Image: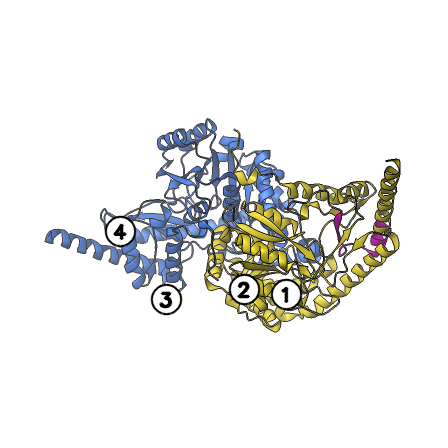
Chain colours: A yellow, B blue
Amino acid sequence: MAIRFADRMLREDFQGEFMKLIMEAVASDDIISFAGGLPNPLSFPVEDIRRATDKVLAEHGVQALQYSAVEGYKPLREFIAGRYRAQGIEASADQILITTGSQQALDIIAAVMLNEGDAIILEKPSYLAALQLFHFYGPKVLSVDLTEEGADCEQLAQLIEEHHPKFFYAIPNFQNPTGLTYSEKVRHKLAGLINASNTLFVEDNPYGDLRFSGSPKTPCKKLMGDQCVLLGTFSKTVSPGMRLGWICCSDPQLYQKLLDYKQVVDLHSNFFCQMVLAQYFADYRVEDHIARITQLYSHQANFMMDCMKKYFPAGVEYTRPEGGMFLWVTLPEGMRAVELSRRAVKRGVAVAAGDPFYEEERGVRTFRMNYTNCADEDIRKGIRMLGEVISQMQAESAASKTEA
Amino acid sequence: MAIRFADRMLREDFQGEFMKLIMEAVASDDIISFAGGLPNPLSFPVEDIRRATDKVLAEHGVQALQYSAVEGYKPLREFIAGRYRAQGIEASADQILITTGSQQALDIIAAVMLNEGDAIILEKPSYLAALQLFHFYGPKVLSVDLTEEGADCEQLAQLIEEHHPKFFYAIPNFQNPTGLTYSEKVRHKLAGLINASNTLFVEDNPYGDLRFSGSPKTPCKKLMGDQCVLLGTFSKTVSPGMRLGWICCSDPQLYQKLLDYKQVVDLHSNFFCQMVLAQYFADYRVEDHIARITQLYSHQANFMMDCMKKYFPAGVEYTRPEGGMFLWVTLPEGMRAVELSRRAVKRGVAVAAGDPFYEEERGVRTFRMNYTNCADEDIRKGIRMLGEVISQMQAESAASKTEA
């Protein structure tokens, strides 16, 4: 039988094809990989989770293993809301919906809001797997440039005016892939724009807790109120393997639709692990744990930037993240990141070429570097090798220009 | 801002409205509920899971908490494939995709296969949450009658011939809601029909392990090969709270699409719990555990049927399940299950009126009874009360006929 697939599975999946190439490279043991986005294993509080788990099963075993509420475990939702309140966001447990990682949050929001052809706006570049996910819903994807300060608000104003997009999806803190953070000025401008429109702001904040320098910025949710849904995750601070994230949504009508959709697609997220996390947060100071992670990532990010300064030829530029897991490199004009990536992987170093992070641009000269999951020695070795490959590409380019 | 929802969220949701009524009734502490579908807490091996969990975190803590493979933990997939092979189904670990409960398996299959307007076939009646889920994709839902022997194959042949449905979704063992099981004869007929068509068979088997009388039937997957995807779950035998199910798919092209979709919507299912289950299955004999569950459910089912025999007036019929969690009651002609349900809940007993289990029929005289989650005394008390309400409705109906 020839299986008849849905159209959504037959669209060209540029991002997916690219992902497979990255995964293949990364799966090899001989490769130093800056291409992925894994948290450092040191960031998993294994022993504390072990004790919390034992307590949950000893004291509430039947409840942990039974079906439960769609929206999630109330004490966990209260913990999340409490942390938001400490940041000045008015939030309560009944505005929190637990999801299977924040990736599922994207799917739920897209499913609840998008008809085929609806306009949405993303940052340029944006999170690769968000692009992939939204593509399933066949929207018109618009992009807004990302500057050192955040989204270009003039472009954004024009796009909103012309296209009335259903939502603008952005990662204002330590963005994936660029590592950039929106300034206070841009946040306030953005809030003005959004609140005067009928466009929802989807604020994805997976890395917000991982700040290692500079000062915390005002959450967009705080400035936008109901017109913003805020996504979070435990993947970068406790465990990605548990697949637990959430949506904070203060518009009751939208919250109800998100809940309705969630109920039908998987009833609820893993309840046992929700109870384990709530127990862990009750018994241990997660802020101390997060401080250990950011201290490590600060070191790794700075070490990587030092190595880049030392080993990259002049003309290569890169962002200086104040937190998160990534930085973003721009090669000199005329060079392609895909070519660098192809050559580097042959020499044992993987990077994530920028192309799949864009909706349209191809053959770009940008690429993403992850610094959280490598030992210093590998960072030094990998960056030195990348520097050599870039220099070689530059020399070839200069030679071919001379010839021409 | 007025949120602009997707059309899929604005369709009339008869099933969902009904579910909310049921949930409200069930949430009350004073109500004896036969309306839900919760496994008995005795079916959760809490202490064994506790030991398995501790072992996983002690020995492989970092792996358990890290991101992992989309398809799921290999030893768990091998365990599932091994159990299939013991039933005569040729299966290997690379044909198993772990999902967030088998509910998510339905969503993944629907997403991968359905365009709006595509025909699909379901049993009449069918699983309420499958109807709800498929509705999101806007298909043309066709229904085939369910007899004591299984799906009506003549109707099915005609529907396939006329509509070329993308798939036929069915629950051949201890069906939800009816408790009915397909005979060997129907299974073979069905396989002949399916294999001569380009319709996929989606065999949902959440209750197959819970057989307490009669003899096991040949899995449809065994008779249909690649033209059948088989769904399973750990929710009824170990823990629903962990939300772990799977798809067994031997068509490599279809498997790849299911995997692609799963990766984009939530990366992978809870990995920690996948490792816990694999450890539990390695260290304990799950067949012994399942035997304890079926012994309990056998008692509960028989006790409920005995009570029905004793307390229900003549003319009320019900199925005699050989396993699973439900039986299906048919009231005498002219009576409506919704009216019974409304009156019964006022007297403290909840049942699931049949209406939402049908795509089209309304005002039906069938309703679903769950027997797994009630003590004997509550079963007796609840059935007696239902019998009284039915008798009263019969008397009123007779009186109004006399008057007329």
On the rendered structure, is B165 left or right of A401? left
Which tag is nearer the camera, tag 3 or tag 2? Answer: 2
Which tag is nearer the camera, tag 4 or tag 3? Answer: 4
Distance of mark 3 from mark 2, alpha carbons?
A: 46 Å
Rendering coords of residue B263 (x, y %): 61, 46
Residue picked out by circle 2? A195
Q: How many marks?
A: 4
Q: Amino acid at mark 1?
A: Arg
Residue picked out by circle 1? A187
Residue picked out by circle 3? B30
Q: Chain of mark 3?
A: B
The answer, for residue A289, to whether it is visible in the render is yes
Q: Amino acid at mark 4?
A: Arg
Q: Are marks 1 and 2 on the same chain?
A: yes
Q: Residue furthest left?
A: B403
- The verdict on residue A221 being magenta is no
Q: Amino acid at mark 2?
A: Asn
Q: Chain of mark 1?
A: A
